[in-house]
Amino acid sequence: MARTPLLMGNWKMYKTVAEARAFAEALGQQSSALRDGVEYAICAPFTTLHVLRVMLPAQVKIGAQNVYPEKEGAYTGEIAPVMLAEFGTQYVLVGHSERRTLFGESDQMVNHKVRAIIENNMVPVLCVGENLSQKESGQTQAIVSGQVVQGLAGLSASDVAQVVIAYEPVWAIGSGKTATAQDAEVVAKEIRNLVAEQIDASAASSVRILYGGSVKPNNIASFLQQPNIDGALVGGASLDASSFADMASAI
Ligand code: PEP
């Protein structure tokens, strides 16, 4: 099954509106790097989503980095799925390791968020990955499998087919260290097999699996060449428009 490659930026807590505008203008000048048949998205701070939607090249979609899984209510400081969907947000990151470790996001909360995002016709990007001590003690497969199964619990096969799963080894995020493309492929393949065994074979062949963790213009192609890796989730290297364009050109 042909899956559309996806290059997705995660800006974390970087960029003011003025800086986001400058990025969009600069990427617009390099839009010849953006190809048909590839999807592009930037997951940006809430405050910059509007200017990005208006100013980014039309091929680049907008995504959020978090959401609260309730329709509305007394949840001071939170943003509801419908509020994101209303102005054109297409993707929402869920369970990024920074949210799991810094904000105590549990697998149960991740699953609530995944379901709420789907109910509002957006695409959840379920982030999973082992930390260094889990890797060193041989627990990668158990940790990743647990996060995938719990994150997708209760979804129909057709919903799972729409989800994006980002395999991001925690030790590779922002560290300058990457998994080898071959090691990332092993985990991506395990994730796809797990979805086939536990949910549905057709959903497994449709679900897109990204690699994330210190992806840069000079290494992105090696990941995208792997049969079970359908794209990249990129933090630091997505903050600069030329670097984003260089990654787009490299895949
Ligand atoms: C991320 O934030 O999801 C990420 C992978 O960051 P970096 O590319 O900077 O490692």
Image (cartoon, rainbow, N blue to C red):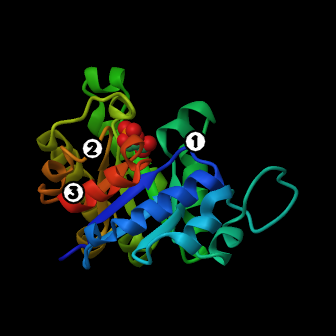
Whether the residues at callouts 1 and 2 have beta carbons within 8 Å, the answer is: no
Which image quadrant: the N terminus?
A: bottom left
Percent across and percent down for residue 19 are 57, 51
Number of the front mark, 2 or 3: 2
Q: Position of residue 132 (x, y in %)?
A: 34, 23
Task: Indicate whether 106 appears above or below 176.
Answer: below
Picture quarter containing residue 143? Answer: top left
| Kind of residue at badge 3 | Ile
Judge by depth and name the residue closer to the eye, 170 or 45: 45
Q: Is mark 2 within 8 Å of ligand 1?
A: yes
Q: Nearer the viewer, residue 103 or 239?
A: 239
- Where does residue 249 sit, x and y in percent of width and height? 21, 61
Q: Which disc is residue 60 wearing?
A: none
Viewer-closest of 207 and 31:
31
Q: Name the residue at 50% across, 48% down.
A: 11
Callout 1–callout 3 Cβ contact below 8 Å: no
Report the side of 106 relative to 9 (left or right). Answer: right
* Residue 236 point in image, percent of width and height: 41, 41
Q: Residue at x 63, y 74 (%)?
A: 85
Label 1 SS? loop
Q: Are dots 2 and 3 in contact, CB under 8 Å?
A: no
The residue under the point 58% across, 41% down is 106
- Label 2 neighbour load within 10 Å: few <14, some 14-19, many 20+: many
Q: Residue 106 bears which disc, if any?
A: 1
Ligand 1 quadrant assignment = top left
Disc number for residue 216: 2
Q: Is residue 153 visible?
A: no
Q: Which residue is mark 3?
A: 229
Packing grade of label 1 (10 A; few <14, some 14-19, many >=20) is some
Query: Which amino acid is tagged 2?
Result: Lys
| Of callouts 2 and 3, the N-terminal one | 2
Rounded to the nearest whole Å, what is the CA distance between mark 2 and mark 3?
16 Å
